[in-house]
Image (tube, rainbow, N blue to C red):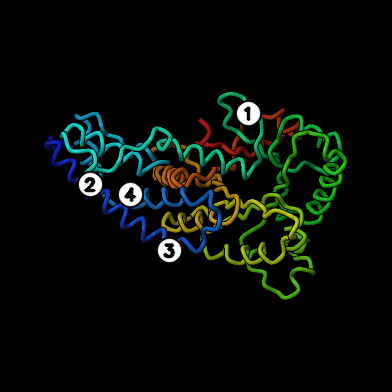
Amino acid sequence: MVVDFSPPETLLAQLIELRKAMIRDATHSFAQWRPFIWRSSFRSAAWNLAYYLALQQRDAQKLERALMPWGLSSLDSGISSVLPHLDGTIASLGAVCRINPTLLPQHPSPRAFFRGERLLKRHTNELFGDRPCQPHDRHHWIVPCPSLPIDASFCQQLRQQQVAALRIDLRENPKQGAAAIAQFQANQEQTQGNGHHRCKLWLTLDEADLGDNRPDSQEQPSQRHGLTRKEILQTADLIEITNLGNPEALIALHHAIQEQTPSDRPYPGIIVSLHPEICLEQLPEIIVRGAGRYPFGIGIPPALIPEVQLSRTGQHYQAILDRCQAACVPVILMNQTEASPQESLNGGTSPLVAVLRSLP
């Protein structure tokens, strides 16, 4: 590609026009999302996602390359802080052009460039719980439920290894899942208040479970998972919805959480495990409808994780990661094979891992 060696004044004018267009489009997107954003901690992240999407709608590659001779090629590098990177570039190029700084966007503070990282860490802690981390530790371990029984010794290992959550899949064996929940809760209660790390309870459902609108659904156990929705909401710290590809499917879950969560219990965190054929255009809406109301994360199933990074699957996967990073939400890779902690607590099954592009 030929580089356009434009004078800095021309580049500055182009950047200012780009900023105006981005703000216009982002404001339109945010206005559509606003009814779904209840959590103040997500508001800044939603704005950043809107700026990111507005930037992606424009071919900024030529402008990016034209800025390189001036040492200012950073438009596409600040995914978690889009507007500060653009404003910083405009302010720096304005200094090159000797433009009065009062006529340009103010140069952002150093903290503004890392606001996205701080938000992502906060959202991760809201989802999995704040825990002491070793330097450069980017993992929150989620251990699959072992064969019954779940005894005190197993729960003690969960605490000692600081496992973030025990994942119980209610799709596979409903009776075993219900028994595992009861055993886990009983052992948690025995050690409650002793200062140990608390492992959260992660329950996995299918998207089809969200559409259960029977009047007696609070009282009659579902044939799919053997528990009522009310029982699930009374016990789950985290609810994973698998194979979700349509943001409208979250409406039923939202109504159930609002109506059936006990008043003395915080709302559960929501994990959306994406459908393998997820449409990228629908992902921002899914994120906003989830993270705008609850602690939230995106799960990426094995079918979406590429074997070759440069393949079409790899490009799709990277686009998903970038949108999650722009929205400052954690990503959970659903087929990690790292054999730890303690070989998935001696069960031999690889744990899920929340791999965060977040924690620096």
Q: Which mark is residue 67?
A: none
Residue appearing at x 57%, y 31% in the figure: 138
Instruction: Say which of marks 3 and 2 sits in front.
Output: 2
Say whether disc 1 or disc 4 marks the residue closer to the N-terminus.
Answer: 4
Q: Which residue is mark 3?
A: 32
Give amino acid for label 4.
Gln
Residue appearing at x 37%, y 48% in the figure: 52
Residue appearing at x 46%, y 40% in the figure: 116
Q: Which residue is mark 2?
A: 16
Asked if the residues shown at circle 3 and circle 1 are in contact, with their CB atoms under 8 angstroms apart, the answer is: no
**How many marks on residues?**
4
Residue 73, image quadrant:
top left
Residue appearing at x 45%, y 55% in the figure: 284
Q: Which residue occupies the foreground of this view, 311 or 275?
A: 275
Which image quarter holds the N terminus? top left
- Measure how far apart labels 3 and 2 are at the Cα level: 25 Å
Residue 167, image quadrant:
top right
Instruction: Say which of marks 1 and 2 sits in front.
Output: 2
Q: Which mark is residue 56?
A: 4
Say whether disc 1 or disc 2 marks the residue closer to the N-terminus.
Answer: 2
Residue 160, image quadrant:
top right
Going by the picture, which residue comes out furthest to the top? 135
